[in-house]
Amino acid sequence: MDSKKRILVVDDSPNEVRILMELLKQDYAVVAATSGEKALEIVKGEHAPDLVLMDVTMEVMDGYEACQEIHKIDKSIPVIFVSANTQTDEILKGFDVGGIDYVTKPIDEKVLLSKVSLVLRLSSKQQFLENEKEQASELVNFALASAGKLSVLFNFLRAGLKVKTVEELAEQVVQACRNFDLDGSVQIRGEGVVNASTQGMLNPLEEELLSRSSNMAERILEKGPRMILRFESVSLLIKNIPIDDEVAHGELRDNLLFIAEDSHNLNLKLGKEKTLHEKRESMVAHALTESQTALKEFEAYQKDHKESSIKIMDELMSEVEGSYFNMGLTDEQEQQISDIISKKVQEALEHMEGGLHVDEQMKAIVESLGEIAKSI
């Protein structure tokens, strides 16, 4: 009889089924179903699976419904959901219907095998504890510990939604390490490099290891109690991961891998937001500069216009007074005409003088725009 654990892969995509079977067939006996209904038939059959890898999005019965129906048949069969949707609400929905874990697409082979191995170990251990009443307290403690670790992940996800800078993100990562009672450091790479540590400061060796890890071919590198997890823009170094407890070790590794991957995604998001912000600033600065130039041109036009108007009025007065001799006017008539013209010239000058206040405001606006443009 084959001693390999039996895994049921459920996915309505033949290509996805083939990928999962290729990854699992070396270590497990793998069977497949392309619908939730077919999966129920296999679970009811003579050889029930030890674990189910369940795709979330399927027709007619989706993965959540299929999980509920499987647990009506045998509640002890663990279900790991497989989906490209990594939103917290989606993950919680999987737990609500009885799922025990979540694997995201595209599938990382090491993560998948680690989660499958961990869940099978947990399932075997749970069955053993159920058969041994004297070990019931151990089961309770294990469940409480798992819940505590899950709360660390949820707190990290919640805090991640609020981070505005790479420095804040790095601090959330090291805080998660502290909550796991781990001694670690993180490096986040982008336009620059940000380092952070649970000890406050990185020593030169830690910084060197984190920098070198960016070129690692592996996603995870382990040596004794030390572990390095690498994503494109994030590296996480743990110095004291437990190695005596295989289950705790595997669970922590999965949780840390999740934190590292989510940190990488958040870092990419922060980078895009910064680029968009800088683009907006550049557009505003350009608009301010153009506005300042236009106002300066208008100010110069206003000045030239006033000077031309005054010159025209002076010339008008001179020409009129020079024409008196040819008009044959009396002195009294000449004086009347001069008085009328002088009065209107004076009114025009007073009107232009009133515009000086507007000129001062225009000058202040030009200076303000210049200062704003310099500060951006």
Image (spheres, rainbow, N blue to C red):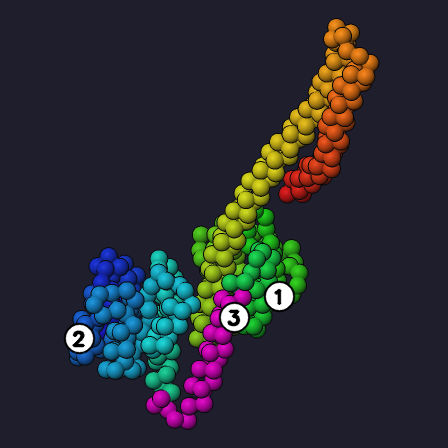
Q: Is residue 343 left or right of residue 130?
A: right
Q: Is residue 211 left or right of residue 327?
A: left
| Residue where numbered disc 1 is placed | 198
Identity, as a three-letter code, of the amino acid under mark 3: Asn
The N terminus - image quarter: bottom left
How many C-alpha atoms fall within 10 Å of the one at disc 1: few (<14), some, or many (≥20)?
Answer: many
Between the C-alphas of marks 3 and 2, the distance is 39 Å
Magenta stretch: dominant SS? Answer: helix
Q: Earlier in the sequence, mark 3 or mark 2?
A: 2
Nearest to viewer (mark 3 / mark 2): 3
Q: Is residue 271 left or right of residue 355?
A: left
| Nearer the observer, 215 or 333 | 333
Between the C-alphas of marks 1 and 3, the distance is 17 Å
Between the C-alphas of marks 2 and 1, the distance is 51 Å
Outermost residue, right direction? 331
Residue 138 percent coordinates (x, y): 45, 87
| Residue where numbered disc 2 is placed | 41
Identity, as a three-letter code, of the amino acid under mark 2: Glu
**Residue at 47% across, 82% down:** 144
Please give the range of residues in magenta. 130-159
Q: Which quadrant holds residue 77?
A: bottom left
SS type, badge 3: helix
| Residue where numbered disc 3 is placed | 155
SS type, badge 2: helix
| Nearer the observer, 286 or 15 | 286
The C terminus - image quarter: top right
Q: Is residue 51 visible?
A: no
Identity, as a three-letter code, of the amino acid under mark 1: Thr
